[in-house]
């Protein structure tokens, strides 16, 4: 099954079509390797291939759900929501960067298998959850409180942030590319 048939995630970040394309690419490469190895058409769809695909797709669906739910938990407060959506953008940038740096690399969708990104998201979610437990709303707090929390979260994303997400000089208008091979600034 393609990801869109295997599981549905709310389209907050519109990742469905891209996720399906990544799965098609992954399956196409696996089929091409099978043909290159001289396997006939029936051997190409081996239990190992389908098991690996199913496992990766499932892990990617859970990852997308985690990124989406981070945003949804913050919907009642726009300032908090802007902070809570940054892990998705960091994941998208990380994924595209890993692919651009090594054309043979095939990370999981939105870099779900990247330990550095997963660790950053773990810390990021813990910081946001600690803030939520205070019961306060960022939209009702002085700008300095937002800036302080944003700075803490920016530092957490630093290992995977090529675009300067939450950079107070840029946010929310990013004038540079996150692509590793060119810069617009």
Image: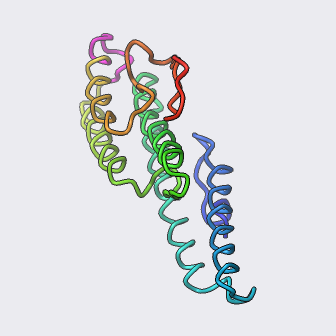
Circle count: 0
27 relative to 91, above or below: below
Left or right relative to 130: residue 86:
right
Instruction: Please give the range of residues in magenta.
Output: 137-146
Q: Residue at x 31, y 17 (%)?
A: 147
Viewer-closest of 68 and 95? 95
Left or right relative to 143: residue 2:
right
State how the image is colored: rainbow
Residue 145 shown in magenta: yes
Residue 3 image position (x, y, % from top left)? 63, 62
Q: Residue at x 50, y 31 (%)?
A: 178
Residue 102 image position (x, y, % from top left)? 50, 51
Q: Quadrant of residue 31?
A: bottom right
Residue 87 shown in magenta: no
Query: Residue at the right extreme?
Result: 41
Viewer-closest of 14 and 131? 14
Q: Quadrant of residue 168?
A: top left
Q: Quadrant of residue 137?
A: top left
Left or right relative to 47: residue 73:
left
Residue 39 image position (x, y, % from top left)? 69, 87
Label the magenta part by its dominant secondary structure: helix
Q: Residue at x 68, y 50 (%)?
A: 17
Residue 185 image position (x, y, % from top left)? 51, 16
Q: Residue at x 30, y 49 (%)?
A: 119
Viewport quadrant of the N terminus: bottom right
């Amino acid at each position: 099954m393609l990801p869109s048939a295997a599981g549905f995630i709310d389209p907050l970040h519109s990742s469905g079509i891209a996720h399906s394309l990544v799965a098609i690419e992954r399956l196409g490469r696996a089929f091409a390797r099978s043909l290159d190895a001289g396997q006939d058409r029936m051997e190409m769809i081996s239990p190992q291939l389908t098991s690996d695909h199913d496992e990766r797709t499932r892990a990617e669906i859970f990852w997308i759900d985690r990124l989406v739910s981070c945003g949804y938990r913050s919907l009642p407060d726009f300032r908090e929501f802007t902070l809570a959506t940054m892990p998705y953008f960091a994941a998208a940038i990380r994924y595209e960067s890993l692919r651009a740096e090594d054309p043979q690399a095939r990370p999981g969708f939105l870099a779900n298998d990247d330990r550095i990104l997963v660790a950053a998201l773990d810390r990021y979610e813990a910081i946001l959850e600690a803030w939520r437990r205070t019961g306060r709303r960022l939209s009702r707090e002085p700008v300095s409180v937002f800036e302080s929390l944003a700075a803490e979260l920016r530092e957490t994303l630093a290992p995977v942030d090529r675009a300067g997400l939450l950079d107070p000089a840029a946010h929310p208008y990013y004038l540079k590319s996150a692509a590793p091979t060119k810069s617009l600034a």
